[in-house]
Amino acid sequence: MISTVIVAFSMFSAIPMPQTEWTNKSMRYALCAFPLIGAVIGALVCLWRFVCLRMEFSEWILAAGICVLPVLVTGGIHLDGFCDTADALASHQDTEKKLQILKDPHMGAFAAIWLGCYFIAQLALAVTAAQMQADLTALAFGYCISRSLSGLAVASFPLAKNSGLAYTFAEYADKKKVRTFLAVLAAVLCVLCCICCGKKGIGVSIAAIGTFLYYRFRLIGKFGGLSGDLAGWFVQMCELFMLAAVVLTEYL
């Protein structure tokens, strides 16, 4: 159990972890521990909000923390996938060419453009949420929900290639048990989010599920299957839309 959590945090976060051997046993349920990284991010974001309000920091400082904390915890692994996917989509090439672009380690112009747009939108939403003193509990739930759905996708969706990060975790996973666990966890988290956070919880849950459905039925079809880069795109877009839901529900 401990080795499984260590493997998940070693791969999907920048949090220092003790060294452990990556074996079939430790990899089998590593995807099940993926949402724990979301729990860490959610706790830090809520703690940062508490500190900023208590110390009467500027809304911009609070907003900057909302944008930066997830990157600090994850080490930017999902942003890397977001950038690669942006380059591939902007190429408007066939599936094979898109997959080649995903493998290219260089950052293209469209990746830089979309990354800039992403952070501008995220910062604008975060500043608005800070100015409204919006409760971020629903967003904290959202970080766990997005990773539950991402892990579910890796264990369930067809893969674009027989190599890479997504393939490695999918290949070693006990897919049936992982799918069941993550599907139930995502459902439970959505229900708890709605109960605890009211309309914000409903908004965050709808944003997460809506992004997941687009991811499954539109985006993955463009690449012939799932890859680690597409999984990163999903996590980033899910976080952005969940933050938008938190802001929008303040107006309802």
Image (cartoon, grey):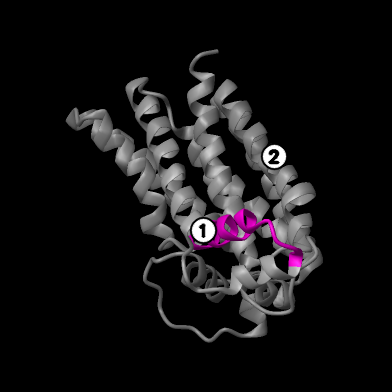
Q: Is residue 147 among what the camera can see?
A: no
Q: Amino acid at mark 1?
A: Cys
Quick one: quadrant of the C terminus?
Answer: top right
Q: Secondary structure at mark 2?
A: helix
Position of residue 142 measured from the top left corner of the image (x, y, whole percent)? 55, 41
Magenta stretch prevailing secondary structure: helix
**For residue 194, side relative to residue 110 (left or right):** right
Q: Height in image: 137 above or below 24?
A: above
Q: Earlier in the sequence, mark 1 or mark 2?
A: 1
**For residue 57, side relative to residue 173 (left or right):** left
Instruction: Specify the label residue 83 is tagged with.
Output: 1
What residue would you read off at disc 2? 209
Position of residue 168 measured from the top left corner of the image (x, y, whole percent)? 66, 77
Q: Is residue 91 magenta?
A: yes
Q: Nearer the viewer, mark 1 or mark 2?
A: 1
Point out the stretch of residues depicted in magenta.
Answer: 80-95
Q: Is residue 9 among what the camera can see?
A: yes
Q: Name, please, the residue furthest toward the top.
A: 252
